[in-house]
Amino acid sequence: MAQTEEFGEELADFVRRVAELKAARSVPHDDLPTVLDTAIFELDHVAGQLWPWYERLTATGTTNTSSADRQEQQLLKAIFQRLPLPVALIDRETVVRRLNFAGTNFTGVRAGYATGRPLSGFLAHADRAAFRSQTAAVARGDGDRSLTVHLQQRPAVPVRATLTALRPSGEPRTAVLVVLQSAGARAPSAGGGPGPVPDLGETTRHAALMDLLDAMTTALLSEPARTRAAVLERAARVLHGRFADWVVADEGAARLCRTTVLGPVDQRDQRDVRAGDLEAQDPAACPLVVEAARGGSTALQVRPEDPDAFGRDASGAPVLVRANVTSLLCVPLTLDGAAQGVLTLFRTGPRLAFSMAEAQAMDLMSRHIALALGNLGRP
């Protein structure tokens, strides 16, 4: 440890000397050879002293890790994965480092997808700030915490999240261990129920996509539309309900004009966003729409991190939060490289998120819609 600190001090001194050399570049031309000789001397010092020193330190660190230690780490990893409670290991920014088998069953999120993403992103928007704040407090040593949160896919079910600090061996930063449990009920066990059983779900979803493609083609070809807005409305009605809870159509590129907004039919909660709120929006105030119109690339987001990605309503509230959007597709309608308009689709609440296959199908339909728009002239 003492050698490591000494090496760090020596390296810090070297960095300071390099900064002085950089500042010396402004000296008179006649004095530059002296500066050059000093720079060469410092390079020799790195090659002859600091680098061999660094190699010795890293070699010592490697040899200190015994076979028994490695076996112990493997055992601990296996225990973590097999724990019957849903457990996640996160950093101070709530980014998931590990999620055990019970955690994947509990959250419905695959471990490979969750790793590297903030755990707060899988929670309802109203709980994210509190969860991030409590995680940061635990990571800086303020003691264990516990709070009630809600998963975005199951907002009606309260979940108790217990956080405790953990210092993994050989790591400089404190991590946070999170245990998730259904509030007032026992947490589901990783082995308590049957595992995933192959079914016809994938085949059914594929057939549904084929039906949707057929319906879109039929709608675009059955009767010639008189206006571009009529084309967008016809396409939006095909997608609404069966494919997305919300469909928002904007025409144009440089100057976007909102033509169609279709939302959920049953909106009993007066706090929910209404179709009129989105109709009153300026598309230029929706970063997702503007980016799609300019860049011409489809955006697929699951549990959108930025609540302002689709702008705000007249009350100043983020649309994605008020509509409880759990996944979205923002698709440019591009013809010969030029955007004809943009379609934005939302799924809300417990509905399954948009998949890559659905995004590809939507990309195909967007080309058909763009061709129909192109037949009516440029925007």
Image: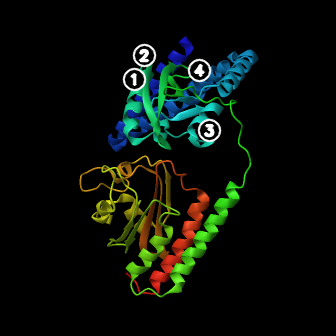
What amino acid is labelled 4 in the image?
A: Gly
Decide if residue 272 is on the left or right side of residue 370: left
Query: Measuring 40% from the left and 61% from the top, which residue is drawn there?
Result: 265
**Cα gap from disc 1 to disc 2, whole angstroms:** 7 Å
Please name which of the two marks, 4 or 3, marks the residue nearer to the observer.
Answer: 3
Residue at numbered disc 1: 137
Can see residue 60?
Answer: yes
**Of the image marks 1 and 4, the number of the one nearer the N terminus:** 1
**Cα gap from disc 4 to disc 3, whole angstroms:** 24 Å
What amino acid is labelled 3 in the image?
A: Ala
**Cα gap from disc 1 to disc 4, whole angstroms:** 22 Å
Q: Quadrant where the N terminus lies?
A: top right
Dot label at residue 170: 4
**Of the image marks 3 and 2, the number of the one nearer the N terminus:** 3
**Mark 3 secondary-structure assignment:** helix
**Of the image marks 2 and 4, the number of the one nearer the N terminus:** 2
How would you rate the neighbour count of disc 4 (Cα within 10 Å): few for under 14, some for 14-19, many for 20 or more?
few
Residue at numbered disc 3: 111
- Hey, which quadrant is residue 228 in on the image? bottom left
**Of the image marks 1 and 3, the number of the one nearer the N terminus:** 3
Can see residue 337?
Answer: no
Q: Quadrant where the C terminus lies?
A: bottom left
Dot label at residue 143: 2
- Hey, which quadrant is residue 132 in on the image? top left
Q: Is residue 340 above or below residue 70?
A: below
Instruction: Verify CB contact (< 8 Å) between mark 3 and mark 2.
Output: no
Query: Measuring 29% from the left and 60% from the top, which residue is drawn there?
Result: 277
Instruction: Verify CB contact (< 8 Å) between mark 1 and mark 2.
Output: yes
